[in-house]
Amino acid sequence: MIEYVDLNHAEELDEFVWQHKNCHFMQSSLWGNVKTDWKWHGLICRDDRGRIRGTMALLRHDIPAIKTSLLYAPRGPIFHEKDREVFRELVEGAKALGKRFGAYRLRIDPRISSGNGLYEKLAQDMGFHIDRSEDFSLFQPRMCYLLDLKGLTPQQLMTGYHRSCRYNIHKAERSGVAVRLGSVEDLPIFCEMMEETAEKNGFEPKDLWYYRRILEHMNGHARLYFADLEDIPLAAAITVTFGTGCWFLYSCSYRKGLKYHPNELLQWTAQTDALREGCRFFDFRGVEGWPVPENPKYGLHQYKQGFGAEFVTYLGQMDLNLRPLMSKAVDMAYKFL
């Protein structure tokens, strides 16, 4: 049985996602409050006794000019990956919603390992096409690094770091770098720092209001960290803690301060905070390509490996075309934008 909920009636959905081993904050209504440029829809699959068996949080992007929409479940749906029937019910529920809004495509990208052949077959049997791109062309990165925090003390956490990483953290502390929590009033500095980082690394930064929505609408689950030297900001980061996980969502720094290694101290502080809050994993977010020296982006791999994180690949971005001809038309149009 499928039940549809809106942002004001999503308490049960959020609680189910919070408790699930595949939990992700983007599958909560909190993320729907952040993504105000999309419409949010929650799907709950219940058994005959009313117990929740699975959920799917969908973001809907409308294209009014051609009267169609994209339905997207970031890092969802959430259910026991062996339960074919729940997956089928959630997808059918999403398709019914798509028909209501004339959606051309349903997109999902679950936090499921690429080695899960059963889930892959479930998706393909339902008609999904899987995109296994290794770069940042997907909505969510397929390749990332995770740090297992289960059972660790801060001392054990530090011991798991590479010796050069430990040295850089201690060097930052000896240099007088200190980490503090920021607020929305600090966002102009954060955005200035992010613009410099974006220019250096070749990506498009978000605007201030986007970061503000994260801090204001994640209900205390988002934090803004700053690493300062004598009250001068050197680096900053935004993290989100939800359920059993902590995500290092955005980070930036000034080139002039990198010699003091503020980023390593930021990571250490965020990870120890996650430990204190009972998190079982710390997500470093995405990387491009495989962790081999031939990869031009290998440096980012090495940086995250320095914290003892494990390289993880997910199954990929999965698309189900609800209106095949419209899907082709939209894809063609985006190629010329």
Image (cartoon, rainbow, N blue to C red):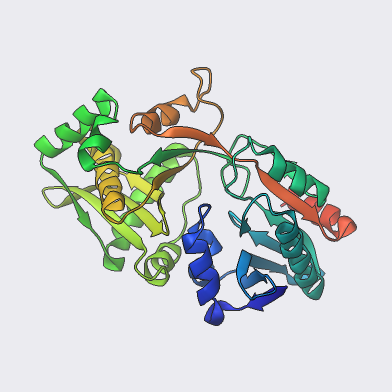
- Left or right: 228 in relation to 317: left
The residue lying at 67 percent from left, 49 percent from top is 82
Give the residue furthest to the right.
325
Regarding residue 63, the answer to whether it shows in the image is yes
- Say above or below: 197 vs 1: above
Regarding residue 69, the answer to whether it shows in the image is no
- Left or right: 164 in relation to 251: left
- Left or right: 327 in relation to 190: right
Check the picture and name the quadrant holding the N terminus.
bottom right
Percent coordinates x, y for residue 262 in the rendering: 24, 40
How many labels sit on residues?
0
The residue lying at 40 percent from left, 26 percent from top is 302
Percent coordinates x, y for residue 297 in the rendering: 49, 28
Percent coordinates x, y for residue 32 in the rendering: 54, 69
Percent coordinates x, y for residue 167 in the rendering: 19, 27
- Say above or below: 33 vs 114: below
Give the residue furthest to the bottom.
8
Give the residue furthest to the front.
49
* Residue closer to the observer: 310 or 209: 310
The residue lying at 39 percent from left, 57 percent from top is 240
Which image quarter: residue 80? Answer: bottom right
Which image quarter: residue 259? Answer: top left
The residue lying at 64 percent from left, 65 percent from top is 58
- Left or right: 324 in relation to 206: right
* Residue closer to the observer: 121 or 132: 121
